[in-house]
């Protein structure tokens, strides 16, 4: 088996609404019947508690300074779909400017963050992690801020979770998702987020 998935294959898959995950040494490809989306308009919701945490500025927010470490943080759990092939493939996408990380740092180091893939107009969130309270949530708020500033139209979360619902995330059927993706890619202006 190849040590990485070719970048062209990954980018084409994302443009078609398909994404990979590793499972027991195999790479599986997914296009869920229902897709999770975080709104980039005024439907995006920040709870009062998180708003208070944001005002305290508990972390130094950085982009793309520790991409591999963010992926390793996301993989550091009992069950993970991030194996060596996925890790190296996305690190290559990052090196090429297509994959990005948002990181929360403090005096003790990297405390949380997220990573994903950016195509023009669309960001595909892959995973997030926290070592300290609210770190991944604050990274997500920073991601949404930057996506708005860069005129992105779509923030794809792949699947919906109760955690993401607190931000206003919702599900759409695959057919509607493909329409949203096509429109975002057609209207996309930027892919570089930092």
Image (cartoon, helix red, strand yellow):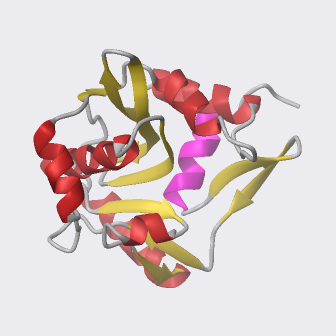
Left or right of residue 73, residue 54 in this image:
left
Left or right of residue 156, residue 80 in this image:
right
Query: Front-most of 142 and 178?
Result: 142
Q: Is residue 12 magenta?
A: yes
Left or right of residue 106, residue 66 in this image:
right
- Please give the range of residues in magenta: 6-16
What percent of the width, then of the height, locates residue 172? Answer: 46, 82
Q: What residue is rendered at 27% in x and 36% in y?
A: 193
What percent of the width, then of the height, locates residue 57? Answer: 16, 35
Q: Is residue 146 visible?
A: yes
Q: Quadrant of residue 104?
A: top left
Placement of the C terminus among the 4 image quadrants: top left
Q: What residue is rendered at 75% in x and 47% in y?
A: 79
What percent of the width, then of the height, locates residue 167? Answer: 31, 66
Q: Is residue 150 visible?
A: no
Placement of the N terminus among the 4 image quadrants: top right
Q: What residue is rendered at 23% in x and 67% in y?
A: 44
Q: Quadrant of residue 62?
A: top left
- Most common secondary structure along the magenta stretch: helix
Above or below: residue 80 compared with residue 49: above
Q: Is residue 156 magenta?
A: no
Query: Front-most of 15 and 27?
Result: 27
Above or below: residue 175 compared with residue 29: below
Q: What residue is rendered at 37% in x and 73% in y?
A: 180
């Amino acid at each position: 088996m190849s040590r990485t998935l070719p970048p062209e294959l990954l980018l084409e898959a994302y443009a078609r609404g398909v994404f990979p995950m590793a499972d027991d040494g195999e790479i599986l490809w997914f296009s869920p019947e229902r897709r999770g989306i975080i709104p980039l308009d005024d439907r995006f919701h920040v709870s009062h508690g998180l708003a208070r945490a944001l005002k305290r500025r508990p972390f130094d927010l950085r982009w793309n300074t520790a991409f591999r470490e963010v992926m390793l943080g996301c993989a550091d759990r009992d069950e993970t779909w991030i194996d060596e092939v996925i890790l190296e493939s996305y690190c290559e996408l990052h090196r090429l400017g297509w994959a990005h990380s948002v990181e929360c740092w403090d005096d003790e180091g990297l405390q949380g963050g997220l990573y994903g893939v950016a195509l023009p107009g669309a960001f595909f969130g892959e995973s997030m992690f926290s070592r300290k309270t609210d770190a991944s949530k604050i990274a997500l708020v920073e991601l949404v801020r930057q996506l708005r500033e860069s005129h992105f139209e779509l923030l794809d979360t792949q699947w919906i979770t109760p955690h993401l619902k607190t931000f206003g995330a919702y599900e759409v059927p695959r057919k509607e998702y493909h329409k949203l993706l096509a429109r975002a890619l057609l209207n996309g202006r930027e892919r570089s987020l930092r």
